[in-house]
Amino acid sequence: MLDIKFVRENPDVVKQNIKNKFQDEKLPLVDKVIAIDAERRAHISEMESLRSERNRLSKQIGILMVQKKIDEAEQLKAKVTSFTERLEFEEKKAKETEEEMTAILMRLPNIIDPSVPIGRDDSENVERERFGEPRVPDFEIPYHTEIMERFRGIDLDSARRVSGNGFYYLLGDIARLHSSVLAYARDFMINKGFTYCIPPFLIRGNVVSGVMSFAEMDAMMYKIEGEDLYLIGTSEHSMIGRFIDTIIPENELPYTLTSYSPCFRREKGAHGIEERGVYRIHQFEKQEMIVVCRPEESMEWYERMWRYSVELFLSLDIPVRQLECCSGDLADLKVKSCDIEAWSPRQKKFFEVCSCSNLGDAQARRLKIRVRGKDGKNYLPHILNNTVAAPPRMLIAFLENNLRADGSVAIPKALRPYMGVDEIFPSS
RNA sequence: GGAGGGAUAUCGAAGCGGUCAUAACGAGGCGGUCUUGAAAACCGUUUGUGGGCAACCACACAAGGGUUCGAAUCCCUUUCCCUCCGCCA
C-alpha cells in the first residue's frame, strides 16, 4: 500500500512502476485516486469547519444554561440543528471517499526496487547464483513418497480417510527427520541472533484482514465455525499481527524473530492440492524468520536473510540456487523478493523451498506499525520475511539428495545431534 | 460457564452530561537553576492521527454503535483485565 501523499506528488513514478509490472489496466487508477483524494480533502475541510462551529455554539449553550437564559439557549439549539443535516452529509461523504481511496491504494502495487529485473511472469525470473554441486547419481531416484514408504515413513491412505486429501501421517525415522529438521532450523536461527517465538495458531478476523486481501483470505484461510477465529496460513500472520497499531521505540529495532508454527491452507483456486505426496498440502509445519527494521537497513537484511537459507540448505548437503522474482511475478506488496530453490536429482531441476521478501513500508502502513525515532518523530519500519525451513516439502529435497544407491539415507553432520544417528535404513 | 468490579497520556490516578483533556494530583523521562561532583529542592518541558500556505482547526478517554445542542460521563454490542465460584488439561 502506497502513501496517498506520495501518489499525489509522484504520479509519474507510480505509473511507470505499474508499467514495469505489466499491469497497464491499473494505469487509470492513479489519476482516479488523486481526484478522489482531492474530493475527500474538500469534504474533510467542510466537515471540520461545521464541527468547529457546532462545538463553539454548544459551548455557548452550556454557558447560557448555567445563567438560566433558557430562551437564548433554545435559539442556539435550533441553529445547531439547522446544519446537522449538512454535517451528516459531509461526514458520510468524507467516509465514503476515504474508503474509495483506500480501496484503490490497496490495488496499486508497491514501488519495486530499481534492482528488480523487468519481466512479464515467472518464466522471466532470473537465476542469480547457484550454491553447491547439483548432482545426478547413477542410480534411479524414486518419487519422494516411495522413498518414504521404503522407510515405512508415510501413510497417506489413512490420512485421506481421516482428514481427506492434502494431509499426511509421518512415521518412524521420517517423522523424526521432520522434527529434527525443524529443531535444527530453529537453533540455526537462534545462533544467528534471532529470537525464537511460538505464536498463536488461531487469529481473529480483523488481524487476518489486516495482513491479507479478501481474495487471499478466501483462498487460503480456514475459519472456525461459530467463532471469530481463523487457522493461520503461516506464522507471519500472527507475528505481524502482534505489532498492529503499535508504536515501537527505535532502540528496540531491529526485531529479528524466528517463529515456529503449523500452517493451514485451503489452497483453493489456481493450483490446488498436488495429488501425490507432501509437496502442496493443507497442513504443514514451518520455521520462519521475520525482521522489522529501519528503512535504510532493509536491503542489507534482505541479502542476509536469503543467504541464511542458502547456508542452512548447504549444511544439509542440498544444492540450491537463488531465483529472483521479476517485476511481473512480484506480489503487489513487495519491493523485492527471491526464492531459494532446492535441487531435485530426480526431476533434474530446482524447485521452490524458501521465499524471501522485502515488503518495504507497505505492510507497516497498512497495519499502522510505527517507530518512534530519536527525534520524537514517528516513521514506518520496513518488514521482511523468509522461510527457514518447511520440513514436509524440504524433506523431498533432503531425501533425494542424501539417498544412497543401497537405499539408505545419509544424515549430514549438522543434523546428527538431532537424529542421533549417521544414517537411516529402509525397513526390510 | 455463573456473579461482581474495572479499562483515561510513559506509569499510578482524579474527573461520572457543559464553563479545567492545552487530561487535576502523584511518579517517571528530558532540559535548566543550585553544587567541587552527586543527591535533595526548585523552575520548565513531556500523546497520536488528519485537514490547512499559515494562524489555527478537527478527531481519539478499550473498540463499534446510539441518545443529546453538547458524551470520558447515560444506553446497547463486542474485546480485554481483576476477584470469587464451577469445570479442566
Image: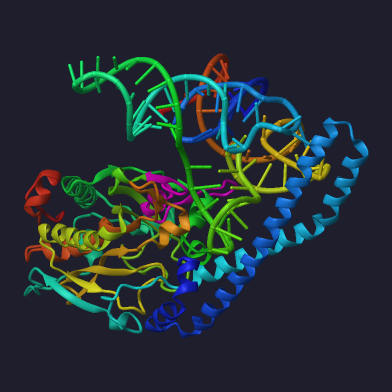
Residue A64 placement: quadrant: top right
Residue A352 placement: quadrant: bottom left
- Quadrant of the rendering where the N terminus of chain A is positioned: bottom left
Q: Is residue A382 left or right of residue B1?
A: left
Q: Is residue A318 left or right of residue A162?
A: left
In front of the other: A66 or A14: A66
> Which residues, given as a range, are shown in magenta?
A224-248
Q: Is residue A356 left or right of residue B63?
A: left
In percent of the image, x 31 and y 48: which residue is there? A260
- Up the image or down, A141 lies above or below A232; here it is below
Is residue A97 visible in the rendered image? The answer is: no
- Up the image or down, A296 lies above or below B63; here it is below
In front of the other: A286 or A364: A364
Instruction: Pinpoint residue A297: horizontal percent, then vertical percent.
Output: 25, 58
In percent of the image, x 60 and y 47: which residue is there? A226
In percent of the image, x 44 and y 82: which residue is there? A23
Is residue A192 visible in the rendered image? The answer is: yes
Q: Is residue A61 left or right of residue A132?
A: right
Instruction: Pinpoint residue A170: horizontal percent, then vertical percent.
Output: 28, 52
- Up the image or down, A413 lies above or below A215; here it is above
In front of the other: A97 or B1: A97
Instruction: Pinpoint residue A173: horizontal percent, then vertical percent.
Output: 19, 50
Say if the magenta span includes residue A246: yes
Say if the magenta span includes residue A350: no
Residue A6 placement: quadrant: bottom left
- Up the image or down, A269 lies above or below A265; here it is below
Instruction: Pinpoint residue A384: horizontal percent, then vertical percent.
Output: 31, 59
- Quadrant of the rendering where the C terminus of chain A is positioned: bottom left
In front of the other: A338 or A66: A66
